[in-house]
Amino acid sequence: MIVRIMGEGQVKLDDAHFVELNKLDDELLEEMESGDESGFRRTLGALLDAVRRLGTPLPDDALEPSELILPAEDATLDEVREMLSDDGLIPG
Amino acid sequence: MSGVMKRMGMIFRAKANKALDRAEDPRETLDYSYQKQLELLQKVRRGVADVATSRKRLELQLNQLQAQSSKLEDQGRKALSLGREDLAREALSRRAALQQQVTDLETQHQTLQGEEEKLTLAAQRLQAKVDAFRTKKETIKATYTAAQAQTRIGEAFSGISEEMGDVGMAIERAEDKTAQMQARAGAIDELLASGALDDPSGMAKDDIAAELDRLSGGTDVELELQRMKAELAGPGADKQAIEGGQAGQGQQAPQAQPGQPRFDKQ
């Protein structure tokens, strides 16, 4: 599966890693929903590190659609919340 | 998977689709419409077939009635020849009743025939319309698909799709890399030309070889000049020789160029 880290690029991840990543991802969602900024920062960092560690980076000029997308390392909780709102990511 | 990753991916896809087509896929709508038209055409054709069947049934009934009418006429004639006027009258009155039925059926037959002709014409017109629609539909679909592809490409480069920033970055990186390679190639050329770097291909000359080339090139020019002077011997030969000499000096400089360090590479 191809995962994009916004602003960084794409990595190819073996499906076997998704159990581990899903835990972090669900945790991230919970922290986002509960407004736990510090927890959100920590978990997002851990999730991005795991994706980078387990995945193989795709060349910069590869134009493959991403199946999963992750916020950039420096994205704030509010920004991510806005992205996930009804109007998120691409306006319109 | 229900976390941030999946939700962001889903939103991206949904938004990209929305950007591509705000309502439904027009190609599907066109296909559906065409299907509906085909169904209608099928109904009209079935109608034509039903009317034609009724018309044929009427024709059979008419034939039977007319056969019966002829039979009664014969029977009347026969009864009259046998002196049985009463029987003849009965036969003729029955025949008259049959004739009434025949007239009614003939009227119905004409009506049905008219209906059938109208329906056949309608079916033909509808068929032509459906055919035209099919052609138009395919053209629209092809145009839409092309437009969709263009939109996708446009999106990828204008930044509407998820690939946005990274494509720009990739291009920038590729440009940087090209500039870097060009600078490096220029520097290597200079180093090779000056003899500071050995050329493994043996094509480049060091500065001593270049100078020797230049000198031998100059000798060739001198020899050529002498030959021309000899050819032009006669009145005005001195002037020609002077001009030729100047031209010869002018020619020397470019000949020496390949061996000189190429600082103007960039």
Image: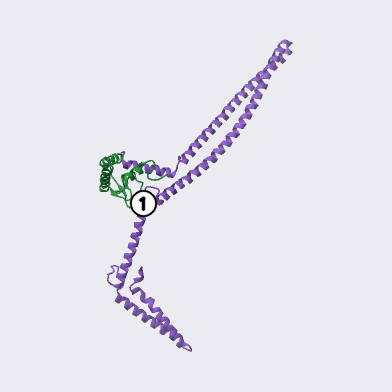
Chain colours: A green, B purple
Residue drawn at x 44%, y 84% is B243
Q: Is residue B209 above or below residue A63?
A: below
Q: Is residue B3 left or right of residue B135?
A: left
Q: Position of residue B110 (x, y in %)?
A: 65, 27
- At mark 1, the secondary structure is helix
* Quadrant where the C terminus of chain B is found in the figure: bottom left
Q: Position of residue B115 (x, y in %)?
A: 62, 29
Q: Quadrant of residue B251?
A: bottom left
Pick the front one: B199 or B169: B169
Residue drawn at x 42%, y 81% is B247
Pick the front one: A78 or B13: A78
Q: Is residue B199 above or below residue B83?
A: below
Pick the front one: B149 or B138: B149
Residue most extreme to the bottom: B235
Q: Quadrant of residue A89?
A: top left
Q: Position of residue A37 (x, y in %)?
A: 28, 43
Q: Is residue B100 above or below residue B243?
A: above
Does the image show residue B29? yes
* Residue that label 1 marks: B165
Q: Position of residue B106 (x, y in %)?
A: 66, 24
Q: Is residue B92 left or right of residue B191?
A: right
Q: Residue flagged by tag 1: what amino acid is it?
A: Gly
Q: Is residue A57 above or below residue B96?
A: below
Residue drawn at x 61%, y 30% is B116
Does the image show residue B84? no
Please report, as a chain letter, where disc 1 is located: B
Mark 1, Cα crowd under 10 Å, few <14 / some 14-19 / many 20+, is some
